[in-house]
Image (cartoon, rainbow, N blue to C red):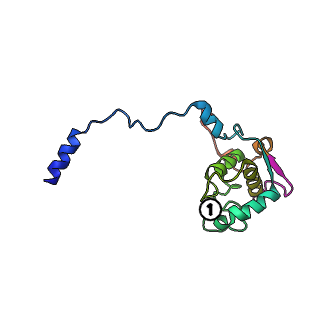
Amino acid sequence: MRRLVLLMCLSSLTWAESPDLGQEIPDEDVRSITVFSDGTGLPTGSGTVAEGKSLYEINCLRCHGPTAQEGPNDALAGDKARTLGSYWPYAPTIFDYVRRTMPYEMPGYLSDDQIYSVVAYLLHLNGLLDADASLDAASLSVVELPNRPKFYSEYDLP
């Protein structure tokens, strides 16, 4: 009997052509919240390695460990697979990822200046920035990550 009732309920449903969920986001809004691999979309602001170290200790250490190589979550530095210095191809996308997803329990908590600082510290831990370095949109856009030549975009393909 239950099967018959279920079959009758399902047969009476009409399906829309689309689920009609949400709304389309205008291109200009997408561009305003997206940082591209060439640095387009990076916000104004700046940060230093020194500031990033203290922010890392407060917001990141519990998940990534004291040297960003240990901890319950992914290693961010060192020669292990998929760290920022050994896997990621573009430095501006690190900013974008941190801004959208970190700290884990409260994404969006850090200001743009704080994110520049944390990214500067992480790049320093990977041997890509000096201890006295600072980052802003212009300087982050030109940081060359070691693995960049191994990545290709659809524009690079024949």
Q: Residues within 10 Å of mark 1 (few under 14, many from 20)?
A: some
Residue 149 in percent (x, y) is at 69, 45
Residue toward you, 38 or 33: 33
| Residue 88 visible within the image | no
Which residue type does callout 1 highlight?
Answer: Asp
**x 66%, y 46%: residue:** 96
The reply to whether the magenta stretch includes residue 134 is yes
**x 64%, y 65%: residue:** 63
**x 74%, y 60%: residue:** 55
On screen, residue 56 versus residue 20, left or right, reads right
Residue toward you, 59 or 94: 59
Residue 89 in percent (x, y) is at 68, 47
Which residue occupies the extreme right position in the image?
Answer: 132
| Residue bearing the label numbered 1 | 74
On screen, residue 40 versus residue 5, left or right, reads right
Q: Judging from the image, what secondary structure is the residue with disc 1 in?
A: loop
> Height in image: 120 above or below 37?
below
Q: Give the range drawn in magenta.
A: 124-135
Q: In which quarter of the image is the C terminus?
A: top right
The reply to whether the magenta stretch includes residue 34 is no
Residue 4 in percent (x, y) is at 14, 49
On screen, residue 56 versus residue 106, left or right, reads right
